[in-house]
Image (cartoon, rainbow, N blue to C red):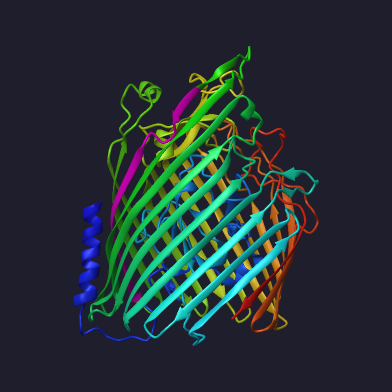
Amino acid sequence: MKKDILLILLVLISYLAFGPMNTHAQNDTVFLDEILVSANRTDIIKTSINGNILEIGNPHDGGEMFINQIGFGIEKKGNYGMEPVIRGFKYSQLNVQFDGGTHTANACPNRMDPAISQISPEEIEKVEVIKGPYNVRFGASFGGVINIVSKRPDRKNKKLISGSFDGGYQSNGNNFYSNVFAQAVGKKLDFSINAGYKDYGNYESGSGQEIASSFTRWGYTVKAGANIKDNQRLQFTLRQSSARDVLYAGLPMDGDHDNSTIASLDYGISNLSKSLFSLKLKMFGSFVDHEMSNKRRPAYKFTHAVSPVQAQVYGGRAEIGINTGEKNILYAGLDYKKIAKQGYRDREVLINPCPPNQEFDPPKVFQDKTWQDSKKNDLGVFFENKYELNKLLMWLVGLRFDYVSYSINDPADDFEEQYNNDIQPDSRIDPTITTSLTWSFAEGMNLQWATARAMRSPDLSELFINHFNIGMDAYEYLGNPNLKTEVNYQTDIKLEKHWKDVTLFGDVFYSYINDYISAKLDTNIAKKYMACKPPKGTKVFTNIDKSFMTGFEAGADVNFLKNFTYSFGAAYTYAQNISWDEPLPEIPPFTINTYLAYKTNKIDTRIHVRIANEQNRVSTGFNESTTPGFAVTDFYIVYSPWKFLNINAAVTNIFNVNYVEHLSRAYKAMDTQSLYYEPGRSFNIGARFKF
């Protein structure tokens, strides 16, 4: 790894010191952090969530901002650290990254701290989404890519120093939030800082039940950049955040603290020569220190449990863009990512929770190996070619190879015994190939067909977790070092039609998956902890030989009466485990998102309705429960009386509906046992001052 960093750094320094002198100057900024290119006809299968949408919805968590987006579901373990689900793909099936290639990883085996929790919504400029495995340039992509682009210095306002301050209050939970953004922009140099603080309490459901959901979070991001020449940019980014006393109603423990540091260094140059139009280099490192415990739970009187865990991610990427012909461009490069996880769970047993409930004096002390000091390395090489066949037809081809290796350096004795001391996974080479055709065959009409064969190697929890409650249920999960790589054969057909005031779109997809990784209950493997308590048996990660997902997203946007917009979108995924003849588990139900908006220079308001059908297609092998349908209505308004002031207000869940999301399960290990209900009605007010 040190050699890789030195090599990338040497190339970067060489170009800074001795870079080509005959470069073509350009007035545009050299963008270092974007995946998508707006108005590019190869990108219609990709979507973007811009900052204005985030501002009016005012989400408090990185995962929450996807809840009203078409084709998404949300997995919720607490009111902090929610995770997006695209169609039915989640966790490491999605490639979640910041600013075009910076990665982080959860240290908590229960995913209290998913990657998306390490960024605050207030610092996001936009979110770029690729639904499906149709990108090879920014890491392995199995079910989709989510690239979160953070705010960057803005030169449009011509001010040396500018920024904004946000603050607000939400009634349901007695929640307070604040955020400040400031930038200093010179001719060559720029600097920005974004910092925020949130203090959220327990909220009430629609029926008035108090839901354990409080948390405190602060964080900041610093960006320092230099436009070395008109066509060259160097940028350093440092992001730090800390969450404290986070309650997770859907998990058996709560978060005492979650500290993260993410740093990246980017360099970009354009127009090196007539044929070489871009070079981008990136190095990054991520460090997460997480601690969880059961000190707020009833079980604390029997056992004091605390689990300090850590995760590190190191890596980088290098990419060149080449004009290989008048109508052809090629991107080629390599990337590297190393994930390392360590940590234990320390238990001090005061009373045996199983009959005859023996008391221990002094207490018995145990240490459980959480991650078994495991590591994953991924070295990738990629090529993506775009060719304009004619004025109406664009062809894209992408090819990627990932060399993946693992290590487990501190295995538990019983884990080795379970697998007869054969616990070292084989290294593997995972090839991915994708291609797409995009027709612009009529004015305002585009048709795209995309297909891909993509692979996902198992993550560390699927391989090495050892009898921990890491799922949405009460079972212990056991990793399987013999897991095979998942293989996804997917295709999408998307049609868009734009008129002056009307836009229609529809996207149909089909995904056939070999060796899909899920967990299956094995009643022959006894629980390791609290064996006297239900449920019986252990869930073991396993490969499902044959499965598929299919579904659609469709919608329309209509502008009328000058300032009004009506939007309607629907999404559905049908997922089947062919080998076991049952549905795949944890798939979002059929969902409709619709809103009516009114927007002028001073007012931006909308009333939004989200309707989710009941989900009764559940996995019996996974022991999954059904959930009822619901409809939730929200009202948002942003009023700008002057250029320097925005006032935002909202009433969420107007009709105080008592409902649960399908991907949120029941309470765990608490005095109150119930479904994990969503917030009831809340009155929200906030303001943004610009300077």
On screen, residue 534 versus residue 148, left or right, reads right
Q: Which residues are magenta?
A: 365-389
Residue at position x 24%, y 62% from top?
Answer: 8
**413 or 351: nearer the viewer:** 351
Q: Is residue 584 visible in this depiction of the protein?
A: no
Q: Main secondary structure of the magenta part?
A: strand
Q: Position of residue 57 (x, y in %)?
A: 65, 65
Residue 387: in magenta span: yes
Give the percent coordinates (x, y) of residue 360: 57, 16
In the picture, measured across the screen, residue 608 lies left or right of residue 385, that is: right
Q: Is residue 271 magenta?
A: no
The residue lying furthest to the front in this view is: 362
In this rendered view, identify the residue nearer to me: 380 or 474: 474
The quarter of the picture where the C terminus appears is bottom right
Left or right of residue 320: residue 609: right
Q: Picture coordinates of residue 159 (x, y %)?
A: 50, 86
